[in-house]
Image: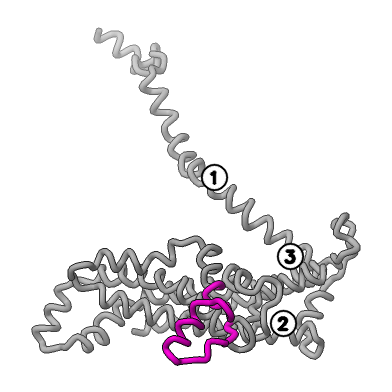
């Protein structure tokens, strides 16, 4: 035994563990690093493929179309459409022309619409989250009722609003007339009232999301902080202003950005209310770009407007994150 060990150590015979063939345990040990490295990529592969098919490829196709003179004459053979260079972009930003002036007015209406909807949604959300923060009988039922607008299908809920806002048979005019607040003949979907109606429906759709997000943020605040503030004599308003709002800043930073992007890109609410003929006061940019593409059959121009809106939102997002992150860092 001693001689065999000596011979193996001297190089005459291989060691016993090297001479023996690899067993199943050793094979599994060799394969495990490869599978562990590939597992995250395999799990991410369906999401990446879905993102590629749904977002990346259509977006790149839209960017390519924006450089083509793709109108009604080339729809059947759109790959043979002549190259337009930056002409579609030049038409879109030429504010002395009807096309550029219309796009600029639509962007202004959309920015005002987004500011109004985001502000009201956040105010209603923080108000509801503060009321529902304390425990009381029926709180779970109220939470469920408040979240119903967000859970309903958007087309079904907005069509109901369209019926309610109808001038002759709508419930809104009937209720206001019964309360002697109007003559019951108001056109809510025409003129300047169209902006108010669209904003009300959008706030009704979005504020439950703000409520849900802010409630989750409030529940992450330790309760002993409020108890200590109460011991020091701080009232509810001081606790809300000095504790709740500052500690919700990270939540608000993300929430306001998400609400703004959703509102600015909202297509379902205005299209369900007005279809292809929105009033000038409710001419949001999503409907305006659709009309430029499908009403005039100029898809190159519509794609150029879409790319410009994408760049605008990227600039706004980067600027917003830079300013809010800097304030948080300074605080």
In this rendering, the count of numbered labels is 3
Q: CA distance from mark 2 to mark 1?
A: 38 Å
Q: Quadrant of the N terminus?
A: top left
Q: CA distance from mark 1 to mark 3?
A: 25 Å
Image point 54% across, 85% down: which residue? 196
Q: For the view shown, which residue lies furthest in the front direction?
A: 178
- In the picture provided, is 313 more to the left or to the right than 152? right
> What's the magenta region?
162-188
Task: Residue 46: tell me if it is visible.
Answer: yes
Q: Quadrant of residue 148?
A: bottom left
The image's colour scheme reads one colour
Q: 329 or 256: which is nearer to us?
A: 256
Mark 1: secondary structure: helix
In magenta stretch: residue 171: yes
Label 2, on which residue?
103
Label 1, on which residue?
46
């Amino acid at each position: 035994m001693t001689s065999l060990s000596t011979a193996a150590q001297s190089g005459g015979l291989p060691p016993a563990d090297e001479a023996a063939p690899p067993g199943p345990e050793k094979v599994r040990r060799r394969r495990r690093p490869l599978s562990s490295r590939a597992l995250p990529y395999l799990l991410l592969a369906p999401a990446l493929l879905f993102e590629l098919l749904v977002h990346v490829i259509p977006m790149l196709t839209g960017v390519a179309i924006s450089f083509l003179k793709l109108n009604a004459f080339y729809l059947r053979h759109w790959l043979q459409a002549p190259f337009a260079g930056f002409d579609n972009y030049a038409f879109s930003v030429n504010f002395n022309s009807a096309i550029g002036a219309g796009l600029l007015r639509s962007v202004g209406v959309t920015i005002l619409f987004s500011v109004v909807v985001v502000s009201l949604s956040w105010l209603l959300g923080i108000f509801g989250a503060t009321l529902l923060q304390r425990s009381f009988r029926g709180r779970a039922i109220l939470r469920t009722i408040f979240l119903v607008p967000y859970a309903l299908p958007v087309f079904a809920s907005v069509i109901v609003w369209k019926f309610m806002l109808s001038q002759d048979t709508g419930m809104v005019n009937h209720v206001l007339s019964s309360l002697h607040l109007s003559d019951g003949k108001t056109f809510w979907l025409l003129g300047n009232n169209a902006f108010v109606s669209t904003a009300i429906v959008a706030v009704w759709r979005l504020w439950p999301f703000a409520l849900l997000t802010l409630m989750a943020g409030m529940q992450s605040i330790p309760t002993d902080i409020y108890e200590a503030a109460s011991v020091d004599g701080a009232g509810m308003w001081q606790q809300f202003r000095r504790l709740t709002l500052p500690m919700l800043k990270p939540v608000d930073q993300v929430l306001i950005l998400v609400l703004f992007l959703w509102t600015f890109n909202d297509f379902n609410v205005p299209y369900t209310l007005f279809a292809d003929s929105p009033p000038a006061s409710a001419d949001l940019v999503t409907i305006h770009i659709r009309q430029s593409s499908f009403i005039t059959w100029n898809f190159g121009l519509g794609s150029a407007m879409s790319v410009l809106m994408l760049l605008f939102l990227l600039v706004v997002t980067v600027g917003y994150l830079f300013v809010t992150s800097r304030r948080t860092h300074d605080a």
